[in-house]
Structure formats: structure tokens, C-alpha cells
Image (spheres, rainbow, N blue to C red):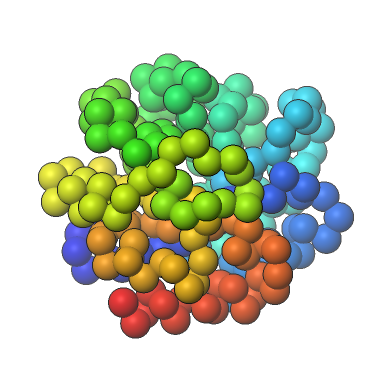
Amino acid sequence: MQDDISTQLYLISPLDVGGDFPDRLARALDAGEGLVTAFQFRVKGVEQHEAAKLAEPLQATCAERDVAFIVNDSIALAKRLKADGVHLGQKDGNPKEAREELGREAQIGVTCHASRHLAMEAGEAGADYVAFGAFFPSTTKDTEHRAEVDLLEWWTQLFEIPCVAIGGITPDNCKPLIEAGADFLAVSGSVWNGDEVAAIKAFSEQIASA
């Protein structure tokens, strides 16, 4: 990714995407004025038919705004929804398998924790982006792995594949990650646990001033 492209936001859904969440998503995407370029649909313990129903309005909202709709963990659900891509944890299959199922255009991301080795492996297997973290304690997910900022610097100096920073990222602590070269900040709790519009605007200000 070229140096002249600044950091963008990769928005991850809360586990509960029912109720008024579709409206909240639309507000968050609109608040960023193009800052949010990807949205990850992340629900747990929901069977595929129900997940597809929940995804429908969110996918439409993303499509209207040209935001990539990425499914977390499930290649099968991504295929069913004709999603823009899939995000794979280390136990969710590999990029080659996802590419065969989802086609050449799919965006395939891989969680690499704090591991340079896993990131290089993901890149070799054809991942479109790698995700490092957690950089900070997270309210959304238990974090066993802690990543340091120099991991982002190392990756961006050596590799062309975009990197995503994840884990407890807020407008107050994101500056070092932006300065280290993170292509994307993956954010969830810091947006959905309060006023989503204010949160996106606060991220926008930090990115603009970095």
C-alpha cells in the first residue's frame, strides 16, 4: 500500500447485531465520510440461516457506501452471502482454501497475533491482509497475545500486503499505531459501547493529525 494513503478504519460488529444495529452501522459509516473501508460481520453461536438473515440489512448498508463486507471465521457463510471476503483466525482454514471457495476477487485476511512467522506464512498463502494484535487490553475479546508497535513498523518496511492493528484500540491510544504504519485500525468496542458517530469522528481527528 502506498505511503500516501493514510490509515483507514476496519469496523468490527458487536456480537448482537439485531434491534437498531443496522441504523447504528449506517450512522457510523456516514460519520467517517469514507474513513471506514471495511466492516466485519462477527456473530457467534448463531446457525447459518439466522446469521444470513442478520447479515442482509448490514450487507446492503455496506454495499450502498462501497464498504467491503467481510465475514468473520466462516468461509461457508461468506460464500453463501457472496460477501466481499472472509477473515480467518488461525483455526478457521487457510487462505488457499478460502481463495478456492470464494474466488479471485475475495478479500482474505488472517489473524497473526504477535507473530512475524504467522504473518509471513499468511502472505505466502495468498492473504490480502494480515491482522496483528492485541495492542491493548480489549473489552470485546479475551486476548492471550500482545503485540508491540515495532511489529507494524517491521511489517510495513518489508511487505506490500496491508496490515491491520487490532485489540482495545481507542481514539486516545491509536496515534502510535498510525505512526508505525498500520494500514487499518480494527475497532469495535470503542465505537459500539458509546456514541458511534462521536467515536468515528474522534478516530478521524487522530488519523488526520498523525
On screen, residue 143 above or below 150? above
On screen, residue 176 above or below 87? below
Quadrant position of the N terminus in the picture: bottom left
From the viewer's perspective, is 51 left or right of 202? right
Between 91 and 144, the residue placed more toward the observer is 144
Q: Position of residue 149 (x, y in %)?
A: 29, 55
Rendering quarter of residue 106 = top left
From the viewer's perspective, is 146 left or right of 199? left
Q: Report whether residue 126 is seen.
A: no
Image point 72% across, 45% down: which residue?
A: 15
Q: Position of residue 104 (x, y in %)?
A: 37, 30
From the viewer's perspective, is 91 left or right of 22? left
Image point 49% across, 60% down: which residue?
A: 169
Between 76 and 130, the residue placed more toward the observer is 130
Image point 44% across, 81% down: which residue?
A: 205
Between 80 and 159, the residue placed more toward the observer is 159
Q: Position of residue 118 (x, y in %)?
A: 31, 28
